[in-house]
Image (cartoon, helix red, strand yellow):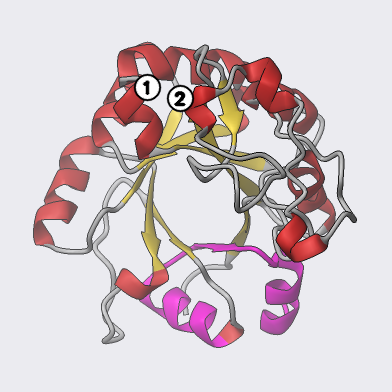
Amino acid sequence: MSTQARFIAHRGVARHYPENTLAALLAAEQAGADAVELDVQFSSDGVPMVMHDTMLERTTDGCGNIGTYTADELAAISAHEPQRFGDRFLGENIPSLSKACTELAGATSLQVFIEVKPESLTRRPPHLSIPAVLEASAPLGSRRVIISYNDGALQTVRSRADCTIGWVLPAFDRATIERARALKPDYLFCDRLRFPAEPTALPVGSWAWAAYEVETGEQARALMRQGVTWLETMAPQELRTELAL
């Protein structure tokens, strides 16, 4: 088995709190996570907001596309995931990235993985979106890691700041790994279902391997045997307990 696993709270402690809310993100430290991951979409006025989906219906009491609302309008929308939690978390509104990072600046044990979603980059190209993300996340200092499926966006990060980056792999194949060798990211993220089924060692490079959508100890152990160090899960405390770490 590889070195000791490290745990990333995926969209915060999203099994127990509405995803990507301040409640979910700030619960990560107490849940024993080493890091927290959050997602970024953009408002109509170009403000990075913490949200996974482009559409509001799944996680909020709003409707429509996030990109049609201003930041002030989004900040007034409750992201309490009523379909999962009813009104228990009513008032956990959509946070801006700036607000989330200011709050997380006090959680000094956590790294913060900030995923710039590809839909946002379609509407706002990297030369516009990345500077806004870097400015909003500045309170985190060296604890921030900018991640994306879009390797061009990560190149923009590198050109604008001395900042750690992670590439979310669009596929797991030889061509993609060669692109990774050219990019030289600090982290490679991959959906656990995309890893090779056979228990072979993963390609080694400038990066540490991170797997997301990890739900069970059995899945985690198999990934660790292949060389995955970082396990991204919506329930970090339960997974750590299952692994007895």
Residue ID at (57%, 67%): 5
Q: Is residue 68 above or below residue 143?
A: above
In the image, is residue 233 part of the stretch drawn in magenta? yes
Residue ID at (29%, 37%): 150
Horizontal side, residue 3 vs residue 186: left or right: right
Q: Which quarter of the rendered picture does the C terminus lie within?
A: bottom right
In the picture as drawn, the residue positioned furthest to the front comes out as: 63
Of the numbered discs in the image, which one, if any, rests on residue 38? Answer: none
Please tell me which residue lies in front, 20 or 43: 43
In the image, is residue 240 part of the stretch drawn in magenta? yes
As helix, strand or loop, the secondary structure at mark 2 comes to: loop
Residue ID at (78%, 56%): 17
Mark 2–mark 1 CB contact (< 8 Å): yes
Please tell me which residue lies in front, 57 or 45: 57
- State which tag comes first along the sequence, 2 or 1: 1
As helix, strand or loop, the secondary structure at mark 1 comes to: helix
Q: Is residue 32 above or below residue 242?
A: above
Q: Nearer the viewer, mark 2 or mark 1?
A: 1
Segment tinted magenta in the rendering: 218-245
For residue 129, what is the image quadrant? top left
Which residue is tagged 1?
Answer: 157
Which residue is tagged 2?
Answer: 163
Rendering coords of residue 169 (x, y %) = 29, 53
Q: Say what amino acid the circle numbered 2 marks.
A: Cys
Q: Badge 2: how crowded within 10 Å, few (<14), some, or many (20+)?
A: some
Is residue 139 something one can see in this rendering? no
Is residue 97 something one can see in this rendering? yes
